[in-house]
Image: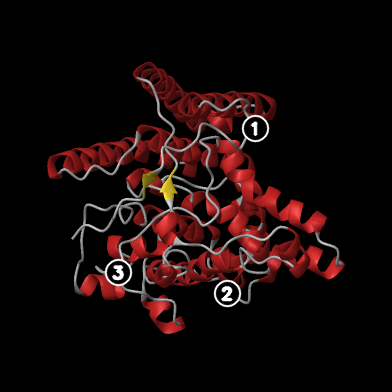
Amino acid sequence: MQAAQIIVLATPVFLLLIALEYAVGLVRGRNTYRLNDALSSIGLGMMSQLTGVFTTLMTVGIYSFVYHHAALWQLPGNVWWIWPLALVFYDFCYYWHHRLGHECALFWAAHVVHHQSEDYNLSTALRQTSTGWIAGWLFYLPMALVGVPPLVFGVVALVDLLYQYWVHTRQIGRLGWFDRVFCSPSNHRVHHAVNDPYLDKNYGGILMLWDRWFGTFRDEDDEEPCVWGTRGPLRSWNPLWANLQVYAELARDSWRTRRWSDKLRIWFKPPGWRPADLQQLDPKPPFDVRRVRRWDPPMSRRAQWLAGGLFLVVLNATGAFLWFAHELAPSASALAALGIVASLVLIGMICSGEPSPLSSEGTPARGLPAEPPSLH
């Protein structure tokens, strides 16, 4: 069975849990969902899966090539102990992939998509990048070099990814000893926060032990409610711009700065770093979490029904495409994917009133303050 087909089978479970979380929030008087944000997050997850149809062959091919031609030895895939060891090894590699995704601008440009939501709920877990394939595979080559079979690698990668779904919720509080060892909702809420004490913390996918060992762990503090999003807010529901925003900003700064060394350093310095000449020419004010306002352009009831109805159609079309993609000719796959992406752009325009599909500016924000998020 194809990995995309497994995701299709898991999708009803994802959506059922989203509905359950929404219902629990309503009962508690702590709803964490907005229609526009949820459609955007789930749509970006769909777009990421579409991209995977065309890029997985490359990334798996690179891993397999290294395994077959450069591995120090080839471990057996038919003994039970390989699987838990491979999962721990994968989670270790994921920690460094995730950490560099926050500490290097080039990798942040891909990973930022997952952090752009200013809400925090299970739909946020589905919000995934479509450009991670460009360089993300580099971090897992050590597994190929020590001989972890491609099948084992693929399975543990999927397990690590699926595990992280449930931690994207505000409806589960502290879990005691579990929080000290494993990635949990409390730990991951910290990871998504833009508050100074929480910034760039808690990278582990399954285990928090990596963060504790390498000095990147931070516990959730009741006196410091998490505020979510990014310090360079997206201000758009457009899925194309969500994936291109940071790349465009880096390219613009790289073009404008004068020194050739700075043109290159921009891509590999931490996110937010700017050369002295650009900071002097176009200074950016320091980030102040107290001034964060959620972007929430109003939607009429008609627009909500239109966006929701179209989204259900596109969701089913995406499921059908992912299920049969391996049987389609490349040209047919490309046309189907383009049609789905165009529909997602249209949904984003309905949600935000954007004047054009590639615009990064839409209807002004309502000026809603970021909600105190942590529920215990």
The amino acid type, in three-letter code, at marker 2 is Val
Q: Choose between 138 and 344: the one closer to the eye.
A: 344
Q: What is the C-alpha distance between the residues marked 2 and 1?
A: 44 Å
Q: What is the C-alpha distance between the residues marked 3 and 1?
A: 37 Å
List the residue tagged with mark 2.
146
Residue 182 locus on image (x, y percent): 31, 69
Q: Choose between 147 and 213: the one closer to the eye.
A: 213
Which residue, as the protein is rendered here, is positioned at the far left? Answer: 27
Checking the image for residue 220, the label placed there is 3
Q: What is the C-alpha distance between the residues marked 3 and 2?
A: 36 Å
List the residue tagged with mark 1.
358
Residue 23 locus on image (x, y percent): 19, 38
Dot 2 or dot 1, earlier in sequence: 2
Question: Compared to 56, does 64 lie above or below?
Answer: below
Coloration of the structure image: secondary structure
**Under tag 3, what secondary structure?**
loop
Q: Are marks 3 and 1 in contact (CB under 8 Å)?
A: no
User: Which quadrant holds residue 289?
Assistant: bottom left
Q: Is residue 130 visible?
A: yes
Single out the mark in the foreground, 2 or 1. 1
Residue 345 locus on image (x, y percent): 56, 28
Tell me if mark 1 has few (under 14), some (14-19) or many (20+) residues whose alpha carbon lies within 10 angstroms of its own. Answer: some
Q: Choose between 303 and 81: the one closer to the eye.
A: 303
Q: Are marks 2 and 1 in contact (CB under 8 Å)?
A: no
* 285 on left or right of 174: right
Dot 3 or dot 1, earlier in sequence: 3
